[in-house]
Image (cartoon, grey):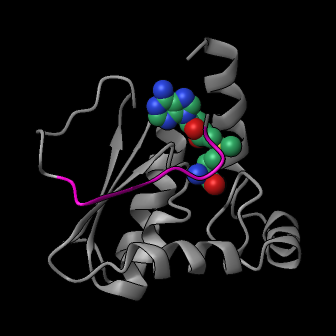
Amino acid sequence: MIRHELEHHGHRYQRAHQDLVLALEQETLGTDYGANGYTTIDQGNRLGALLDLDVDDVLLDLGSGCGWPGLHLAKDNGCRVIGVDPVIEGATVARSRAIEDDMAERALAVVGDGTDLPVRGRSIDAIVHSDML
Ligand SMILES: C[S@@+](CC[C@H](N)C(=O)[O-])C[C@H]1O[C@@H](n2cnc3c(N)ncnc32)[C@H](O)[C@@H]1O
């Protein structure tokens, strides 16, 4: 990822919890995670229904930003989640949200690159990637 993209997303994630930004997110997507894309709460819930996750599953959220939608899916389904994104500001917000939602033990926010994943083979049960090419 090139430097100006890292900075762009980093600035976006630093503002994720400003009142106006949250109000816009809630109004347009129906979420309050600091989402940085176009995936609505209904679409996120449809993903959850399709994946049919349970408490023994590990979900990988690629390009997880501030944790949307991986944290939401893990909260709803009780599974574990690993979010991977190269932007540290997003991982910081995601980690705080996991603690706030009492999911610190089962939600990891990893600063990393999806093209060189820091996970062992066969350790992941499902993958989501919301608004990441
Ligand atoms: C449009 S944002 C979507 C973030 C989040 N999924 C959401 O819906 O709010 C795309 C994200 O992909 C991340 N990204 C870009 N290249 C990546 C890569 N090689 N590996 C992991 N994440 C990457 C960016 O840093 C950014 O946070």
Q: In the rendered image of this protein, does residue 43 appear above or below residue 128?
A: below
Q: Residue at x 80, y 77 (%)?
A: 26
> 87 or 70, which lies in front?
70
Quarter occupied by residue 5: top right
> In which quadrant of this rendering is ligand 1 seen?
top right
Q: Which residues are magenta?
A: 124-132
45 left or right, relative to 99 = right
Extreme residue toward the top, this view: 2
Q: Which residue is drawn at the image coordinates 83% and 63% (left, top)?
A: 21
Q: Position of residue 66 (x, y in %)?
A: 55, 55
Q: Position of residue 78 (x, y in %)?
A: 29, 85
**Does the magenta portion include 129?**
yes
- Residue 25: image location, x then y, percent: 80, 69
Asked if one can make out residue 71 in the rendered structure from this viewpoint, the answer is yes
Assign the magenta stretch its main secondary structure.
Answer: loop
Q: Is residue 132 above or below residue 101?
A: above
Residue 70's image quarter?
bottom left
Q: Quadrant of the C terminus?
A: top right
- Front-most of residues 123 and 23: 123
Q: Is residue 81 magenta?
A: no
Q: Position of residue 120 (x, y in %)?
A: 11, 39
Q: Nearer the viewer, residue 95 or 40?
A: 40
Measured along the vertical axis of the image, is residue 47 above or below residue 30? Answer: above
Number of marks drawn:
0
> Residue 3, relative to residue 79: is it above or below?
above
Res 32 seen here: no
